[in-house]
Amino acid sequence: MSDSPLEARLAQYLTLTFAERDALRWLERRERALPAGEILIREGEATDRLYIVARGWLHGSVKLKDGGRQILRFYFVGDISTTFSIAWGQSAATLQAVSDTQLFEIEKDAFGRLFRNHPRLGALLFAVSTSEQVAMADRLTSIGRTDGVTRIATLLLDIRSRLRVVDGLDGSVFSLPLTQQDLGDAVGLTKTHVNRSLKALEATGLVERQGRVIRINDVERLAEMVDFKDRHGSVATDWLPPPVARSDMDHTG
């Protein structure tokens, strides 16, 4: 694969040096394919790996006491999955492919060397991760305090915002390879309630569906209606340390 998905994503926020680009590409050496529906790792399983998404979608979920599940977040091109587990030796969530997916597998110590040799990249990854955590908190807040229409609209707007960064999505039309069960598990609704909420959204004229294709006809109006805040479009980079000169770096390999 000629393009580096992680490099392309981070370059949306910052002009990367050649050394930084090389370091990111060095991480993307070991590929792994994952067909739609296959589980990458289960909640509680031991792991010392992280994965960069090169193609496709995944989601991370936890099992609930009643046998259901809560989808915590979705992973798109350029995302680093299993970051939920980086602080422990086991996975804090079950990661499953939503669509046919291609990943780059990274050992934790290789990821650690990236932070040591390129502190500016490490700081940028921290900033991006923080923005994602805030976005997830926004969605969980909407689950606890809003109706079904607002929950679904918030999720669609968040997905659209993420795709604009990681896939270069132009406009407000995107394919949504999620079942109504997936949507319900992400926003705390039954399939029946998801279906009813989607129809109510369509009735406003702000959202259209055609099969798996979603069109948001007026992003600003929909965002205002549900009080959506775009957490992914930009991150502050003025506080980042300067890039490390090649002569100051240890060998990344």
Image: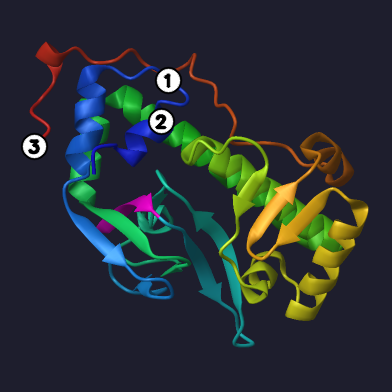
Q: Which quarter of the rendering shows the C terminus?
A: top left
Q: Earlier in the sequence, mark 1 or mark 3?
A: 1
For disc 1, the neighbor class at 10 Å (few under 14, some 14 to 19, many from 20) is some
The span from disc 1 to disc 2 (Cα, nearest Å) is 7 Å
Magenta span: helix, strand or loop, mainly?
strand
Label 1 sits on residue = 14
Q: Is residue 48 visible?
A: no
For disc 3, the neighbor class at 10 Å (few under 14, some 14 to 19, many from 20) is few
Q: Which residues are magenta?
A: 48-55
Identity, as a three-letter code, of the amino acid under mark 3: Gly
- Residue at 24 percent of width and 43 percent of height: 111
- Residue at 35 percent of width and 71 percent of height: 35
Label 3 sits on residue = 253
Q: Is residue 85 above or below residue 122?
A: below
Q: Is residue 145 above or below residue 44?
A: above
Q: Is residue 194 visible?
A: yes
Identity, as a three-letter code, of the amino acid under mark 1: Leu
Q: Is residue 167 left or right of residue 137?
A: left
Q: Which quarter of the rendering shows the N terminus?
A: top left
CB-based contact (under 8 Å), mark 1 and mark 3: no
Q: Position of residue 8 (x, y in %)?
A: 38, 32
The span from disc 3 to disc 2 (Cα, nearest Å) is 21 Å
For disc 2, the neighbor class at 10 Å (few under 14, some 14 to 19, many from 20) is many
- Residue at 54 percent of width and 21 percent of height: 236
- Say which element carries label 2: helix
Label 2 sits on residue = 10
Q: Position of residue 31 (x, y in %)?
A: 21, 55
